[in-house]
Image (cartoon, rainbow, N blue to C red):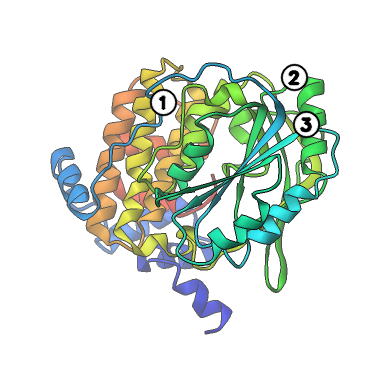
């Protein structure tokens, strides 16, 4: 399959038509007008109750909260950094991952906790070679999913800072030194560094922050890896279990509880591209609806934590409505309309009196949601300008 055809398989027909028109220099408003002329305007939308019932029939909401049932007290911080590695069927990569952690060039003390989450391959046997290391803890448990594995690592932190490493990824040998230097110097809650995305052919993508500087937490990239977090940020929260896209929790419950967020220019993390991962195949599976469910749950958790609902979290949520919608792009028009309706209710429940002033793109998303204008929402959600 050539590169062009490969890209086509990742678009719904309507999305492809919108992108085609944009390629012909049509603007979003013109595209909306043109589609309506072709009678592609809004069809009757389901009620909220119908939408919830239909989406739950395809992929039930687990209603799994991200709030800890028992608030953690400060652990004895015997280490500077705890590195939590969730591993499931990682026999091909886990050794490289752990060796990159053990080979850190740093003056700081590290605790490495690897959670073997019910692997059925040779992961458990490979991990046995590290059991004699004084700062390596191996935990074998029945499969609980990515969140369940990470949450096991959050049960007792025993360090000033913590980080998450995927079992097929690699740390640069400066990871701990560079991030902890900044963390302790600036008394930071979060420190993030640059990363490379790679596969067997080499580097696919590289991202670096511009400066060693204090940073707006809402502008951090959303992945949990590539950063260190002050342990106190996880005193009350965990990753919500039984959902895909559980990382959304960081944007809603962790980032803006951070008083000091810093970035470093250095590349500290190497992320392996996985063609079999959730991101690659999620749009074709009904469980992609989890993107909506987890957003809804995290807003409820935010309310229960008594965190502020401000303009910034409103923008986060408007962007998330587009993300949720696009993640369901291959599940059919009925699903996407139901997702739109549920998201209208979410905006009404939590942001009814909000009115954006300073973001023209998100303003159109806001208008479409509040005006019950499904077609305009589709056009702007697919424009990927946010």
Left or right of 9? Residue 123 is: right
- Disc 2 to disc 3, C-alpha distance: 10 Å
Q: Secondary structure under badge 3?
A: helix
Q: Is residue 270 visible?
A: no
Q: Is 262 situated above or below 267?
A: above
Q: Would you name the residue on which mark 3 appears?
A: 180
User: Is residue 83 visible in this depiction of the protein?
Assistant: yes
Of the pair 29 and 322, the residue shown nearer to us: 322
Q: Mark 1, residues whose alpha carbon is within 10 Å: few (<14), some, or many (≥20)?
A: some
For image coordinates 62% across by 44% down, the residue present is 225
Secondary structure, mark 1, is loop
Q: Secondary structure at mark 2?
A: loop
Q: Quadrant of residue 92?
A: bottom right
Pointer 1 residue = 68
**Whether label 2 touches label 3, CB < 8 Å:** no
Compared to 203, does 140 lie above or below?
Answer: above
| Earlier sequence position, callout 1 versus callout 3 | 1
Q: Nearer the viewer, residue 178 or 367?
A: 178
Q: Residue furthest front?
A: 132
Q: Is residue 316 left or right of residue 78?
A: left
Q: Report the residue marked by disc 2.
A: 187
- Residue drawn at x 61%, y 25% is 231
Could you tell me if the residues under marks 1 and 3 are in contact, i.e. CB atoms within 8 Å? no
Rounded to the nearest whole Å, what is the CA distance between mark 1 and mark 3? 26 Å
Image quadrant occupied by the C terminus:
top right
Mark 2 and mark 1 in contact? Answer it, CB < 8 Å. Answer: no
Residue 366: mark: none
Q: Position of residue 89 (x, y in %)?
A: 50, 62
Crowding around mark 2 (Cα neighbors within 10 Å: few <14, some 14 to 19, many 20+) is: some
């Amino acid at each position: 399959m050539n590169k062009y055809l490969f890209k086509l398989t990742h678009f719904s027909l309507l999305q492809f038509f919108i992108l085609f028109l944009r390629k012909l220099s049509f603007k979003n408003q013109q595209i909306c007008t043109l589609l309506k002329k072709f009678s592609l305007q809004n069809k009757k939308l389901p009620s909220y109750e119908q939408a919830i019932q239909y989406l739950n029939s395809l992929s039930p909401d687990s209603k799994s909260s991200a709030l800890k049932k028992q608030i953690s007290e400060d652990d004895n911080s015997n280490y500077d950094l705890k590195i939590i590695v969730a591993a499931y069927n990682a026999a091909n990569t886990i050794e490289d991952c752990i060796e990159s952690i053990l080979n850190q060039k740093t003056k700081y003390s590290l605790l490495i906790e690897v959670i073997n989450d019910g692997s059925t391959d040779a992961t458990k046997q490979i991990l046995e070679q590290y059991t004699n290391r004084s700062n390596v803890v191996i935990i074998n448990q029945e499969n609980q999913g990515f969140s369940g594995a990470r949450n096991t690592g959050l049960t007792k932190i025993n360090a000033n800072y913590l980080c998450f490493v995927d079992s097929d990824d690699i740390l640069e040998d400066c990871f701990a030194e560079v991030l902890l230097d900044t963390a302790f110097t600036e008394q930071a809650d979060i420190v993030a560094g640059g990363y490379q995305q790679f596969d067997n052919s080499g580097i696919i993508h590289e991202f670096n922050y511009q400066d060693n500087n204090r940073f707006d937490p809402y502008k951090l990239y959303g992945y949990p890896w590539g950063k260190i977090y002050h342990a106190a940020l996880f005193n009350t929260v965990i990753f919500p279990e039984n959902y895909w896209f559980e990382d959304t929790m960081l944007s809603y419950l962790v980032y803006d509880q951070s008083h000091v967020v810093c970035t470093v220019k250095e590349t500290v993390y190497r992320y392996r591209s996985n063609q079999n991962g959730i991101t690659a195949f999620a749009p074709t599976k009904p469980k992609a609806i989890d993107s909506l469910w987890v957003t809804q749950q995290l807003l409820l958790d935010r309310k229960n934590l008594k965190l502020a609902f401000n303009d910034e979290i409103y923008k986060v949520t408007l962007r998330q409505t587009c993300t949720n919608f696009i993640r369901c792009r291959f599940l059919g028009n009925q699903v996407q309309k139901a997702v739109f309706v549920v998201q209208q209710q979410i905006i009404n429940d939590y942001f009814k009196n909000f009115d954006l002033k300073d973001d023209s793109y998100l303003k159109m998303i806001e208008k479409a949601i509040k005006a019950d204008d499904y077609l305009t929402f589709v056009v702007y959600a697919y424009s990927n300008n946010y």
